[in-house]
Amino acid sequence: MNTADMPLKKINSLLLFSIYFLYSISGYAQNNDGKVKTVGKDSLKINFVEKMQAFAKKSSKKSSDEFDADKASVMQIKTFDELSRTMQKANIYLKSKLDTAGTKTVLYEIDKYFVVAGDGVFTNKGTAQTFRNLTATSKILSQLLDKANTKKTGLELRQHEINSFRYQLDSLLSVPALFKFPTDSVTLMKYLQKIEVIAYETSPVDSALRKAGNNIQTLLNKVNLTAFKLQSSLEEIELYQKEMAGDTFKREFNNIWGSDNFYRPFREILDFSITKGLLTLSFYAENNIGKLVVLVLLTITSFIYLRSLKSIYIEGKLLKTDFEGQLVIRYPFLSAILLVLSLFQFFFLSPPFILNVILWSVSVISLTIIFKGYVSQYWMRVWLIMVIFFVLACMGNLVLQASRIERWLMLLLSISGVAGGIVILLKGHRNELREKWIIWSIVFMVFLELASTVANIFGRYNFGKMLVISGFLNVVIAILFLWTVRLINEGLFLAFNVYSGTDRKLFYLNFERVGKKAPALFYILLIVGWIVLFGRNFPVFDYLSKPLLLFFSEERTLGSYTFTINNMLLFIVIMATAVIISRVVSFFATDKHIRTGKDGKNEKPGIGSWLLLVRISILSTGLFLAVAASGIPVDRITIVLGALGVGIGFGLQTLVNNLVSGLIIAFEKPVNVGDIVDVDGQGGQMKSIGFRSSVISTWDGADVIMPNGDLLNAHLVNWSLGGNRKRESILIGIAYDSDLEKCRKILTEILDNEPRITKNPGSVVQYEQFNTSSIDMKIFFWTKHMGDNSGTKSDMIMKIVAAFKMNGIEISVPRQEIYLHHKGNQGNSIRDL
């Protein structure tokens, strides 16, 4: 019996059995009604005890039957409710119709693109396969296989859901309680009607599920066949690539002057090469849209950084006219493009060659504009010649199948490269060369192009084609990377020169040893990157790199935790990037050279103490992305946080107190970056508010590092909250015979004419007391900025002294009169001292 028909057959059997049972009971009742009931004589002899025992048994059986009936009734109601809910869910699920047309469209596109990808590999093979054609075909088929597997997964999931609904219906209709019928005829009739309704409702749902399952299975069979075809084709291409790697020096064609082999028309080769190239590019861009977005964001961020750095140098009049040592900020946007593309291209795993060509071309254009007017004319011409050779070689490498025309063009290009390289080396001008390593890359290019010429002449087409692109690529990539390292070094060094923060290791480099020559680490990374890009042109590189890639991607187990080195490196890279970004934000938001007022005084940065929250947000986002990207289980993080909680409880109370205090300062804002403060006798300006501590620049020039907890608990005096104003006073003593009203008028006039003193609140001149030798008066005034207090007070004293002298007002000085009494003939004499 077909399992698909089980639910419906069980319902029908249950319904027929119920009807038969009902009619049997009815017939039996009618026969019993026609009989005459007689009482046997022996029954009268049953004693009383036996009657009671029989009654008890009968009552017990009746009670047990009633309990079983009630239990069955409850189970039947529960089962019917569950059946209704399951059928409702199944109907809702069936309303989300299977995208049959979409699946068929995908299968049609896969078949169409398979034909395009197989051109030159499975069809129209020609005399020999080419490495670039095999690679392009492999990338297209891999993307098509991913699409097929995605559809396959969706169909299998939908089929599983449908089978699950049918299994639930079958299980519910097999519940034994459904076959326990009520003894009461009225209840039994209602129960049978209920079964009839369930059968009526279940039948179409079961049919729809069965039909949907058949449709899915049909589509799934087609998808499986397509996936199998793609997988088999990929395995066949892998065999081709393995053979080609082993036969690198094998002859594929006759000597270039020999008789013609079989070649397709060059026009056809160009057409399918362009189609394949664009197809690989579109597929790769579709699957790596996130990386492309990150590439754009990094470029914008780098541009903002370099543009801000250039603005700082322009404001400080530090920019040189020849941009010596400052080339990175000559064209900030072009420098950002060059730096980001040169570094970020390694994050694209197995990119199609056409994408590399686009990235290299944009980088070459940017560097060419940056070079203009900076390098000598001779080396600028050399660079342009190398760029032209490189572009022609890339265009030739995009041609995916051999032809006699291409072989002659390759020969002409390689010979031109050899001749051009030799002329460049012999002509000299090496003293004008800013990066001496470029000479060695040109020497290597001459060697490779010469080898390509020989290989092409004697029929080693694939080997010659690898060498011709590798030769010119070697020079251009070397120049791009050398200048990328130089520009990175300049950018960091320029930032260091204007950075006045306390942390001299903002970018984790020892800038005291950085000058015109970049650190050795940069050049090591340059060489590694050059080897990777250079090696991608050879089939054997994939087989040599596979063990290394496998080492990084292989899953390892530590206890119950499974990880890969790739995930660990990804976690470290993301966190390091987040830390560097947070420090760069700190650099531009807190350093005093960023904003200067019209009067030359530093203005308070707008971001202020919100900087701490910004940095915390950056680091938190980085941690979240790092955990998500590396696949670290959340339960492991919970364990770490639990251990950290124990550590906090035992020995990190002070650290946590400072961290929490930093957050309170950021939200409550009792003090902001740039505020003028007095804390426990330490007066100065808030330089930064960090995670654990804050920095106060004192008026003496020292930086006081104060933990945030102490800063929050101290008696903090914030002058900036009052508008950066501070009242000053000057005490003056004048002689007793002075004109008091005239003195007040003179002082008031001096105060009103001083531009650094505010008019609101106004100045006050008042008399304080009668002193022993003077009448004391005091003046009170507010300066517009408390930074002017000392200078204003000094100038006021000078003006007051000059004005009093001019008006004959004596500034009293402390004096003492001593009387000497002498006894003599002349009587008493008094000496006034």
Image (cartoon, helix red, strand yellow):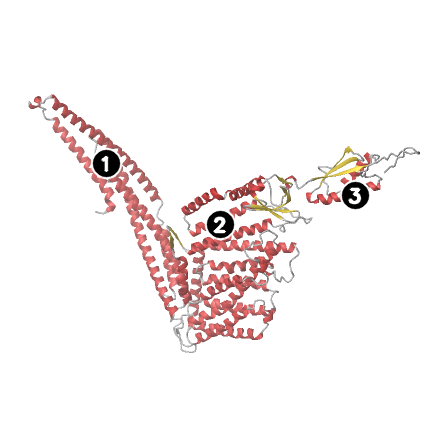
Residue marked by disc 2: 622
Q: Residue at x 44, y 54 (%)?
A: 568
Residue marked by disc 1: 177
Q: Is residue 184 visible?
A: no
Q: What residue type is labelled 3?
A: Lys
Residue marked by disc 3: 799
**Residue 775 shown left or right of residue 336 in the figure:** right
**Residue 345 shown left or right of residue 551 in the figure:** right
Q: Quadrant for residue 669, please give it.
A: top right
Circle 2 SS class: helix
Of badges 1 and 2, the one in the foreground is: 2
Up-down: is 121 above or below 94? Answer: below
Q: Is residue 581 visible?
A: yes
Q: Are marks 2 and 3 in contact (CB under 8 Å)?
A: no
Q: Which amino acid does label 2 sit on?
A: Gly
Circle 3 SS class: helix
Query: Cα distance, mark 1 to mark 3?
Result: 111 Å
Task: Residue lying at the far right in this picture: please name it.
Answer: 825
Query: Cα distance, mark 2 to mark 3?
Result: 61 Å
User: Residue 795, image x and y in percent?
Assistant: 76, 44
Circle 1 SS class: helix
Q: Which amino acid does label 1 sit on?
A: Ala
